[in-house]
Amino acid sequence: MHKTELNGFSIEKYNQYNLDNKAGIGICPLCSSKRKPKNRKLKCASYDWKIGIGTCHNCNSSFQLHTYKRKKNILKDYIKPPKKEITGLSDKALKWFLNRGISEKTLKDLKITEGIEFMPQTNKKVNTIHFNYFIENELVNVKYRDGAKNFKLHKGAEKIFYNIDSIVDYESCIIVEGEMDVLALHESGLENVISVPNGATLNKNNLDYLDNCIDYFEDKNHVIIATDTDEPGKALQSELIRRLGAEKCYTVDFEDVKDANEYLLKHGKEKLVQCIAGAKAVPLENVITFNDVKGDLIDFVENGFKPGYQVGLEEFDKIFSTYTKQFITVTGIPSSGKSDFVDQMAVGYNLKYGWKIAYASPENQPEFLHIHKLMRKFWKGMPSKEDIGTLKWNSFSEHINENFFHITMERFNLDDVLSKGAELVKRKGIKCLVIDPFNKVRDLSTSSEDVNMYTLEYLAKVDIFAKKHDLLVILVAHPTKMYKDKNGKMEEPTMYNIKGGGEWYDASYHGLLVHRNYENNTVKVKVLKCKFQNLGENGAEAHFKWNVKSGIYETIEAPPTNMLPWE
């Protein structure tokens, strides 16, 4: 009986070339039929049925003995580029690649083609090189490049890693920043190499291609990240490490050049292979050396503190910002608008930085009502039934679907929530986790009956999670102790009013107080604590007019005289 699974993938077609599956050697399905008649039956290839790979000693090619079912369940409809026959390249194109160290054999191996294509940058049809994106031997996307270095991907096609099929049968893989780098490494004899489809940017790296291909990394224990040495390349490197896990990642130093193709041209194939082989493990967790922080140290000496992340509300941004690897405690009296302002923060981080947000929010159920609140903030109004199915509705729906995730459980347990959060970091790239409220996401693993010790252990777990996965956690916490002043007015709650007392103030990086005055539709936000002076101002306040229908916050210079927020 044939195997139904290999290398963690379900086999779709066993022995796709109908070879002798009892033999270890035989003909090559790629070149034997093209050889002279007397040589077509020569046994030029080795078959390894255990790992599902064949290797030809005549054409020096490797091939998959089987086809595999794709693990990812694609729910979105993508446009597939038209299938074209793989033909030879023109002499001009071959010369262009040869000048970059790439042989005709490598171009055939990677199925590079050329053809006329409309390029929006020039607003005309021109001859282009086609980097064809296959997954399970099926063409799903094409990157077109013209002679002026203009690029485009096929409109509406699925984004995946370039050359993704090449890593299926390996426990390791190499990730580079461009198709030419894939060709350079393949030219040097390294075949298990893939490229991101859209390069790197300094501030926003949308890794939807990783979301679509995440299952291909489940069996990888050695991921070499060989992105460019410029700042955008380093930013992409950091995000890939965060998503794939530092424990399995290694980084490459291209020394005096920017990328693999430049390294091939300057130093040759052998040196490029040595460079990749010399990839260094990402620094161990909880162990820091000078070299680990050298870049950050130099940046600090030259530029001072880095600015914190802001939410896009001008008056609030003046008094508060944050880094990742931290957590914010948000408090306020019941029904004071804490959750809604946290939603505004989440939407702001998403719009400004492209962050994806996850919620563990027992009080924000049913989830469709919470999603409706988020949609209103993007919509800046209240969508009606006539809006359903419109272009605007579909656009916002798709954006929210791809950027906001709701963790649901019968019983919310902190360990389970953080575990699911870690999975969402890997599979979706979330950058912020909201726990709302903390007292309904219990830490069921603690044995301590002391409330202060319970709080300390709870916040320590959150702190470790935020640091490990380089994200921001927002904790919504209700006060349990409320006092009135000598005039009978309710005093402003502080972090000491939350159950657990001083542990909240001591352990939290930042604390915010939110209060909504329903009569005036106004909101006050006060900084209760900001651990780092460059990120905020303790005791500072921002005041907003709150739009009931849209949930939008509009700045007001000062609270109205009839605002009595704590009565």
Image: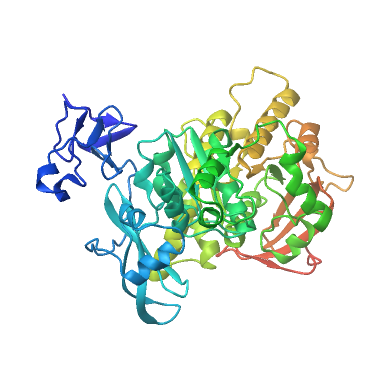
Front in this rendered view, residue 383 or 422? 422
* One can see residue 195 in this view: yes
Q: Quadrant of the N terminus?
A: top left
Is residue 131 toward the left or the right of residue 313 in the image? left
Is residue 272 toward the left or the right of residue 295 in the image? left
Query: Measuring 33% from the left and 54% from the top, which residue is drawn there?
Result: 105
Query: Measuring 50% from the left and 41% from the top, which residue is drawn there?
Result: 426
Q: Is residue 31 above or below residue 219?
A: below
Front in this rendered view, residue 209 or 123? 123
Residue 326, position as x, y percentages in the image: 70, 43
Query: Measuring 20% from the left and 41% from the top, which residue is drawn there?
Result: 28
Q: Quadrant of residue 170?
A: top left
Q: Residue furthest right?
A: 486
Q: Is residue 277 above or below residue 262?
A: above
Residue 176, position as x, y percentages in the image: 50, 51
* Mark count: 0
Q: Tell me the colour scheme of the image.
A: rainbow
* One can see residue 243 in this view: no
Is residue 290 toward the left or the right of residue 147 in the image? right
Q: Is residue 360 above or below residue 194?
A: above
Residue 477, position as x, y percentages in the image: 68, 40
Query: Measuring 60% from the left and 29% from the top, which residue is drawn there?
Result: 442
Residue 542, position as x, y percentages in the image: 77, 60
Q: Residue furthest left?
A: 37
Q: Is residue 559 above or below residue 284?
A: below
